Image (cartoon, helix red, strand yellow):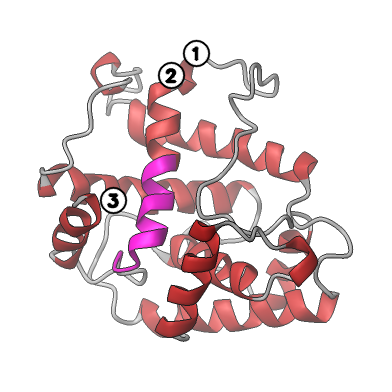
Amino acid sequence: MLRLVLTVCFLLSPGWAYDFKDSYYNDFILENFYTYQTKNPNLLKIGEPQDGTCKRPLKYHCCDNLNEEQNLQLEVSKIECFVEHVLTSAEGVIDAKKIAGPLDIFSCEKLKKMQEEFVCVSQCVARKWNMTDEAGDLFSAEAVGPIVKKFYAEQVYEDAQVDRFVKECVEYTDKYAAATTEPQCNPAASSFAYCMWRKSNLECPDAKRDTSAACEQLRDKLTEAGEE
């Protein structure tokens, strides 16, 4: 039922590069946002996660491929950007009403707002990691590749394989950017992240795969959908 509601609302969204039609990735986004919101990220001491607050299992991340140290730093950037773009008011003050509030899954207006926030947070994170210019456009695959490789654990993917992921995902982002209809923030980073999520899950080495029923179903669905 939740996926049906999300799909109906997301189908009514503006023409952003990532169109929010992948129900599994939408669940992934929703989990991230709800976790940050309910964990009161504005109260976290950045860089010193406690009780697994920043280091948590990710739903629909079905490959044991992450460099934990680098991804912890990435989580810190996500929290900073979430506070900046979601919890902070136009006056630069933390809005207490936005912390740990309920998520009304039947409100398309609220879900569309979450889409906008996701795009803006993604742009903010990519900029912090020097993957985009000031306008939010991705740098070349040659410039982005070495940064992306830091997020993966050693000996999971060949360097040439990650280079191919990045090249194809930059091309994917450029292709769909032309269809963007004046979003609040640049959707390049969010589209790139979606593309990399797909490829890293689909091409995960057998020895690193999560073989749970949920992950097997995810891979089947991604394979059926094919490349965008």
Residue 152 placement (x, y as % from top left): 76, 58
Between residues 148 and 213, which one lies in front from this camera angle? 213
Left or right of residue 19, residue 197 in this image: right
Q: Give the residue number, with chain letter if any, for mark 3.
A: 116
Q: Give the residue number, with chain letter if any, for mark 2.
A: 40
Between residues 81 and 54, which one lies in front from this camera angle? 54
Assess disc 2: are there few (<14), some (14-19) or many (≥20) residues with their C-alpha within 10 Å of its C-alpha: some
Q: Give the residue number, with chain letter if any, for mark 1.
A: 43
- Residue 186 within the magenta-colored segment of the rendering: no
What predominant SS class does the magenta segment belong to?
helix
What separation in Å lies between label 2 and label 1 (alpha carbons)? 6 Å
For image coordinates 54% across by 39% down, the residue present is 78
Disc 1, disc 3: CB below 8 Å? no
Secondary structure beneath label 1: helix
Residue 108 placement (x, y as % from top left): 12, 49
Disc 2, disc 1: CB below 8 Å? yes
